[in-house]
Amino acid sequence: MRRDDRAPKPDAPVYEGAERLQKVLAAAGVGSRRACEDLIFRRRVTVNGRVAQLGDKADPTRDVIHVDGERLQADVRLVYVAMNKPRGVVTTMADEKGRTELADFIGARLEQRVYHVGRLDADSEGLLLLTNDGTLAHKLMHPSYEVLKTYLAEVAGPIPRNLGKRLTAGVELEDGPVKVDAFKVVGTLGRTAQVELTLHEGRKHIVRRLMAEVGHPVSRLIRTSIGPIKLGDLRTGRLRRLTNAEVAALFKAVGD
């Protein structure tokens, strides 16, 4: 009997749409089928929390697969995209007022219909995640998962030395208190300063409202990261698909 023809254990879940596990892994971009067989043989793959064996099958649309402890999104129908949203673009796929919208940049580049994860107001720019994975999108946006977001803001200066402490301690807004997880001054030029803020809040215009409340209104706002995903050198208006490692990092950020 060949080692890859062994029958799965009786308790291994097998669905109607299941395929050989090494085929599922290879289709998800893990490596060649032979390389994936080796991963399974070395007990580096789990399916639904169970260590996989050669001969096991999995359904990429239903089973939860981990490789070396990292969640693998094996469902090839799901897409994960990063976009550098330009200033002046509204975060919607169909704007009733006819303004420049996300659909104008996505066009026919993606076959699947995707949705934005969170929002950036029209005057803000930077990193936006797009996906058709509704479960992950919900977790990334829900405040209980505390996924950090980092922003680079140009604000009115000068910045007092105690501002960071004030922001991390918490500031009361009309809809409740807010505090940042990290704050630093990046640079100053005349009466304008560049500051970096990291927070897990997702309320509307939260950074602009926060900085206005402490006397330093924002003139430009760029989101530079969402959880483990960085804007990097992605050019304005461009899109790129996330790597398997980046998708796994997003799952890890929400505890999956």
Image: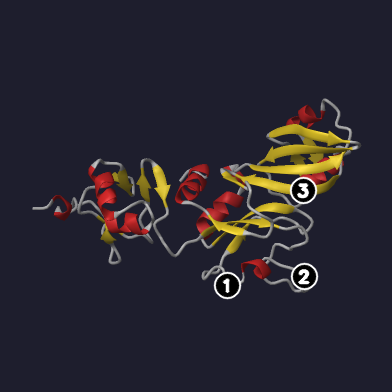
Among the two numbered marks 3 and 2 on one chain, the one whose residue lies closer to the N terminus = 2
Q: Is residue 31 left or right of residue 153?
A: left
Image depth: mark 1 or mark 3 in front:
1
Neighbor class of circle 1 (other Cα within 10 Å; few <14, some 14-19, many 20+) is: few
Q: Could one spot residue 175 in this view of the protein?
A: no
Q: Could one spot residue 185 in this view of the protein?
A: yes
- Percent of width and height locating residue 103: 65, 69
- Percent of width and height locating residue 86: 73, 58
Q: Residue at x 29, y 50 (%)?
A: 36
In the image, what residue type sits under mark 3? Leu
From the image, tell me which residue sits under label 3: 221
Neighbor class of circle 2 (other Cα within 10 Å; few <14, some 14-19, many 20+) is: some
Q: Secondary structure under badge 3?
A: strand
- Percent of width and height locating residue 226: 61, 46
Q: CA distance from mark 1 to mark 3?
A: 28 Å
Q: Is residue 119 left or right of residue 50?
A: right
Q: Secondary structure under badge 1?
A: loop
Q: Secondary structure under badge 2?
A: loop
Nearer the observer, 176 or 218: 218
From the image, tell me which residue sits under label 1: 108
In the image, what residue type sits under mark 1? Ala
In the image, what residue type sits under mark 2? Arg
From the image, tell me which residue sits under label 2: 99
Q: Residue at x 62, y 67 (%)?
A: 106
